[in-house]
Amino acid sequence: MTEIVLITISGEDKPGLTATLTEQLGRHDVNILDMGQAVIHDTLSLGILIEVPGEKESSTVMRDLVFKAHELNVQVKFEPVSEEQYQKWVEAQGKPRYILTLLGRKLKAHQISQLADEVYRQGLNIDKIERLSGRIPLDQVDTPARACVELSLRGLPKDINRMKEEFIQLGNQLEVDVAFQQDDLYRRNRRLVVFDMDSTLIKTEVIDELAEAAGVRDEVSKVTELAMQGELDFKESFRNRVKLLEGLSEDVLDEIADRLPLNDGAERLIETLRCIGYKTAILSGGFTYFGKKLQEKLGIDYVYANELEIKNGKVTGEVTGEIIDGRRKAELLKEIARKEGIVLEQVIAVGDGANDVPMLNAAGLGIAFHAKPLVKKKTSQAISYNGLDGILYLIGVRDREITRDNLIFSDEN
């Protein structure tokens, strides 16, 4: 009669340990039904589910493995598994799988506890927890800390919409970013990231900087804020703001373009995306003049924004061509995806304002970055407490895969 046994091995990790133990099992010609291994702080936890053929004696297998474990100075435990238990495990395959990503400057036990409690209440099981962030020395003070763990979940949530809302509320309460995604083929195969420019890729609103130079900042800033909150029609408010810039010298545009402040993590993110084969785009309700400058600086593949009309070295107060509003951003996202030969599920969109919502919802992964409350409510994911490079964790990139110079790949753990 076939016997099924779960073997659990723990102790100090050392090179060749797994090879030696499986070699011992191999001498008894057992079948491996399942296997999993994790190493935390040089401590190994290895689980092996084996099937001992009817003509073999499990007691002999276990005896020999105990002797070998003793030689290796590791602990070994055995647990018999009934055929009924095994069959239930087999039938559980095919259940939905999800990825829960927790990002913060530092992670606290109570943060993980509250998120794990919600996972439990929803009837999901945590299959695996993995650290994506690098190892941070305790005395490191000159580099902003990043901490990220990824939880692999399995099961069918009791109320997925309620669960998503709870994760958002917990993230705000705990001051960490929480991302919940279905773990499918598309999550592991994104190919295009499109960015809003103002207050997303860069820290400022360019039109406010232009207004400052023109002496009309207060008036323009008020309208900009209302437009980003979704309280004004974007096209109408945009034309009204641009009119106030009439007469501004083209030289001022160059000065502003040269000092545009990038948002934290922007360069690290885009350089890494380029290294792993992603395409990038700026889809902006701002101005092409500045988008092109960023394209040159960062190596962006596509730029679509509004053309600020300039005649005789002066801003006329008009824009040429179609104004890029929220609807147009979503259309452009789809056009680029078609050109690149990818489906929308492979697109990531990042933005902060109300006019970004259509493109955020059109993408397979829409991320509200340091966004207005209205935008967060209408978007599936949000990053509010980390830099733009936090997006790398959402696509499963580990810090150890990125060298200090942002060139892939490093073998450090």
Image (cartoon, rainbow, N blue to C red):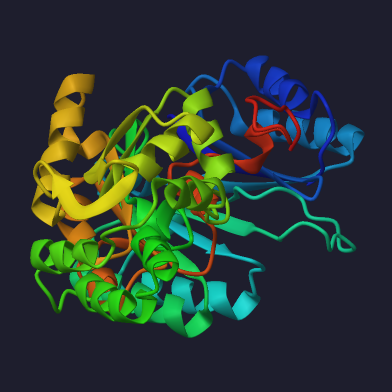
Along the line of sight, which residue is nearer the eye, 18 or 333? 333
The residue that appears at 36% across and 81% down in the rendered structure is: 218
Can residue 336 be seen here? The reply is yes
- Is 89 drawn above or below residue 173 in the view shown? above
Q: Which residue is drawn at 84% across and 63% down?
A: 141
Q: Residue at x 46, y 52 (%)?
A: 252
Residue lying furthest front: 312
Q: In which quarter of the image is the C terminus?
A: top right
Q: Where is residue 134 in the image (x, y as percent from the top left)?
A: 71, 48
34 or 265, nearer to the observer: 265
Q: Name the residue nearer the viewer: 307 or 71.
A: 307
Above or below 330: residue 234: below
Asked if residue 49 shows in the view, the reply is no
Residue 366, x across and y down, in percent: 28, 53
Question: Which quadrant would residue 398 be assigned to in this image?
Answer: top right
Of residues 161 and 141, which is closer to you in this image? Answer: 141
Count of marks overlaid on the render: 0
Against 28, residue 101 (above or below) is: below
On the image, the x and y values in percent for residue 190 come to: 33, 34
Residue 343 location (% of width, % of height): 17, 30
